[in-house]
Image: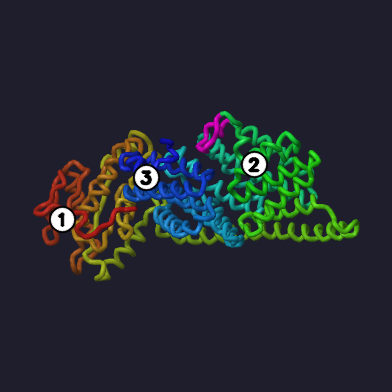
């Protein structure tokens, strides 16, 4: 059976697949869906949703974020599915914000911009692009838990999504800057598929830019853009052959991709491109492809003296684009091309009047373009300043190394929790790293800092959103678990302990956790509770580390649990108080 025709029963058992396979399969489906018929697009989208559900079941935050991105992307590339992207966009924004995944959070804004363009909401799309750019203007530290190559690919994909929005809006200068930044990430780490996506997007940008320059009489600059696009169309041939796009390996990329084929034709219009572009015109699936191929084919036909056939091609495209709002700049280019080739019906006077009107219209539109760039920059700066202000406020309560709440934030939160009966029982844990000093001594303090960051993120991800993990100082952390009985708190903390113990050696360097946990007693001060948690932690240390000790209320010397994790009496149940898994 053809892999493209399999039904759900033939799909792989996802629980047997690796995390990397889930992410890679989603990327593959995103490539396939862009050239698939409507019925297959819906089936592929359903498979991406299954991949997302499996990722959410596993609960690793970075994988979930990448699968959310794929689930949104497969919808915003298809107008008929765009509305269903909105709840997933909300989920992606909330998830990335909670886990501090700034680059993927910026991508969510870019993808929302693409969805808004489908609905014709240009101004709102511009705002989303400005927000995304402002987020990437920050000094972002690469996520060591993703790895360098994956980090570069995520950054590149986000920049390409932002560049796509700006290209559709006709803000070509800024889009060019964004694409250049994406190129640096792609050159460092990308495979053939992402290289192909980047080069095709770059061709599309240059073609749109060239057509726009022609509208204001800048024919030489337009020709330069077309020539560069044609050179890129030649360069994309090798990576396209190894990309994830469905393709015929026996045919060149220019015969299969409308943007690549059109780039070659616009640089050198002639009859040699007519057959190729005619075939591509029958296969186009997106408005941008329709406009670009129609203009390229019409120019080749005009070159051969077939003006009437060229006019028919443009008129058909103009009719198809009549109600489409997703490509405002290209649509106007199409209308202008049709008017140029149509010629006057009323003689020289009509021609002169039409040219004068067109000149005035173009001047006004050019001013609107300048205004749009200014608007983008203003909104971008506003968002940057707003985020900077928020960052300064957060820094006062944030540990700069791990990003966790600091001692000041801990004191404020502990006071609030202790003073509210609705948060009781309240469990307080003190966490100390086993073997951390050896990392600093054997390797370096820089490696030690990386370990602290990884352990901090792992503990935070393993606990509930309402739990607080704060850096207490050095390699010590405090965890507050509101509403948690002692046994349930111990079970939840054991998940964090296990997650750290199972980290790859190259990330943790063998560091584990010793944890002491207590329940806050009535009328007990925070200082006294932390002292008891500290005593419990040292008992865990004396047992050899990588362990939890819970001191029962009223019995400072007695503990719950032994080195093997068994409890006195009933075993601790991490579901007993409905502590949800992190998703």
Q: Nearer the viewer, residue 479 or 156?
A: 156
Q: Nearer the viewer, mark 1 or mark 2?
A: 2
Residue at mark 1 to residue at mark 3: CA–CA distance: 51 Å
Residue at mark 3 to residue at mark 2: CA–CA distance: 37 Å
Tell which circle, 3 or 2, labels the residue nearer the N-terminal end: 3
Residue that sits furthest to the left in the current view: 569
Residue at mark 1 to residue at mark 2: CA–CA distance: 66 Å
Q: Is residue 549 above or below residue 270?
A: below
In-image side of 562 versus 397 (left or right): left
Tell which circle, 1 or 2, labels the residue nearer the N-terminal end: 2
Residue at (21, 43) in percent of width and height: 545
Q: Which residue is mark 3?
A: 8
Residue 428 is covered by the magenta coloring = no
The secondary element bearing badge 1 is classed as strand
- Residue 529: % across, % down: 21, 60
Residue at (46, 61) in percent of width and height: 393
Magenta stretch?
A: 238-249
In-image side of 251 versus 502 (left or right): right
The secondary element bearing badge 2 is classed as helix
Q: Which residue is mark 2?
A: 203
Q: Report crowding for label 3: few under 14, some 14 to 19, many 20 or more residues within 10 A (C-alpha).
A: few
Residue at (17, 48) in percent of width and height: 539
Tell which circle, 1 or 3, labels the residue nearer the N-terminal end: 3
Q: Nearer the viewer, mark 3 or mark 2?
A: 3
- Residue 252: % across, % down: 61, 31
Is residue 486 visible in the rendered image? The answer is yes
Q: Nearer the viewer, residue 284 or 376?
A: 284
Q: Is residue 109 above or below residue 294?
A: below
- Residue 451: % across, % down: 35, 42
| Mark number, residue 551 | 1
- Residue 337: % across, % down: 75, 51
């Amino acid at each position: 059976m053809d892999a493209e025709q399999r039904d759900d029963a033939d799909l792989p058992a996802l629980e047997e697949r690796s995390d990397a396979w889930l992410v890679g399969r989603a990327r593959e489906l995103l490539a396939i869906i862009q050239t698939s018929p409507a019925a297959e697009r819906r089936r592929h989208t359903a498979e991406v949703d299954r991949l997302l559900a499996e990722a959410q079941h596993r609960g690793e935050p970075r994988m979930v974020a990448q699968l959310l991105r794929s689930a949104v992307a497969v919808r915003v590339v298809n107008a008929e599915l765009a509305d269903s992207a909105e709840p997933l966009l909300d989920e992606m924004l909330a998830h990335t914000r909670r886990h501090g995944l700034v680059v993927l959070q910026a991508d969510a804004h870019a993808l929302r911009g693409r969805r808004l363009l489908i609905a014709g909401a240009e101004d709102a799309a511009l705002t989303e692009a400005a927000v995304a750019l402002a987020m990437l203007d920050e000094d972002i530290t690469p996520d060591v838990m993703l790895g360098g190559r994956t980090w570069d690919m995520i950054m590149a994909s986000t920049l390409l999504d932002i560049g796509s929005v700006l290209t559709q809006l006709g803000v070509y200068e800024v889009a060019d800057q964004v694409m250049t930044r994406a190129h640096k990430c792609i050159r460092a780490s990308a495979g053939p598929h992402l290289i192909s996506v980047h080069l095709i997007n770059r061709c599309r940008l240059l073609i749109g830019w060239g057509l726009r320059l022609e509208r204001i009489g800048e024919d030489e600059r337009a020709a330069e853009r077309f020539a560069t696009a044609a050179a890129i169309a030649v360069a994309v041939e090798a990576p396209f052959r190894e990309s994830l796009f469905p393709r015929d390996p026996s045919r060149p990329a220019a015969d299969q991709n409308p943007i690549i084929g059109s780039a070659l034709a616009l640089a050198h219009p002639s009859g040699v491109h007519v057959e190729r572009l005619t075939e591509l015109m029958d296969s186009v699936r997106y408005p941008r492809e329709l406009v670009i191929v129609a203009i390229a084919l019409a120019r080749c036909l005009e070159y051969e003296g077939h003006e009437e056939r060229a006019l028919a091609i443009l008129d058909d495209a103009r009719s198809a684009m009549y109600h489409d709002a997703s490509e405002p700049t290209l649509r106007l280019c199409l209308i202008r091309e049709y008017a140029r080739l149509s010629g006057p019906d009323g003689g020289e006077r009509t021609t002169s009047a039409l040219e004068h009107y067109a000149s005035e219209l173009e001047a006004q539109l050019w001013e609107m373009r300048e205004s749009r760039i200014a608007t983008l920059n203003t909104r971008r700066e506003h968002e940057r300043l707003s985020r900077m202000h928020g960052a300064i406020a957060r820094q006062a309560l944030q540990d700069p190394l791990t990003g966790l709440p600091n001692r000041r934030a801990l004191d404020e939160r502990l006071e609030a929790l202790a003073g509210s009966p609705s948060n009781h029982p309240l469990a307080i844990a003190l966490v100390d790293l086993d073997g951390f000093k050896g990392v600093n001594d054997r390797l370096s303090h820089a490696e030690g800092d990386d370990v602290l960051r990884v352990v901090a993120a792992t503990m935070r991800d393993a606990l509930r959103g309402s739990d607080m993990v704060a850096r207490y100082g050095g390699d010590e952390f405090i965890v507050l678990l509101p509403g948690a009985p002692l046994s349930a708190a111990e079970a939840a903390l054991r998940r964090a302990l296990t997650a750290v113990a199972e980290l790859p050696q190259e990330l943790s360097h063998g560091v584990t956790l010793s944890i002491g946990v207590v329940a806050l007693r009535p009328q007990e001060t925070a200082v006294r509770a932390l002292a008891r948690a500290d005593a419990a932690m040292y008992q865990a240390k004396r047992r050899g580390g990588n362990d939890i000790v819970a001191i029962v209320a009223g019995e400072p010397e007695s503990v719950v649990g032994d080195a093997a994790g068994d409890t006195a009496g009933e075993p601790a149940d991490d579901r007993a108080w409905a502590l949800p898994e992190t998703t």
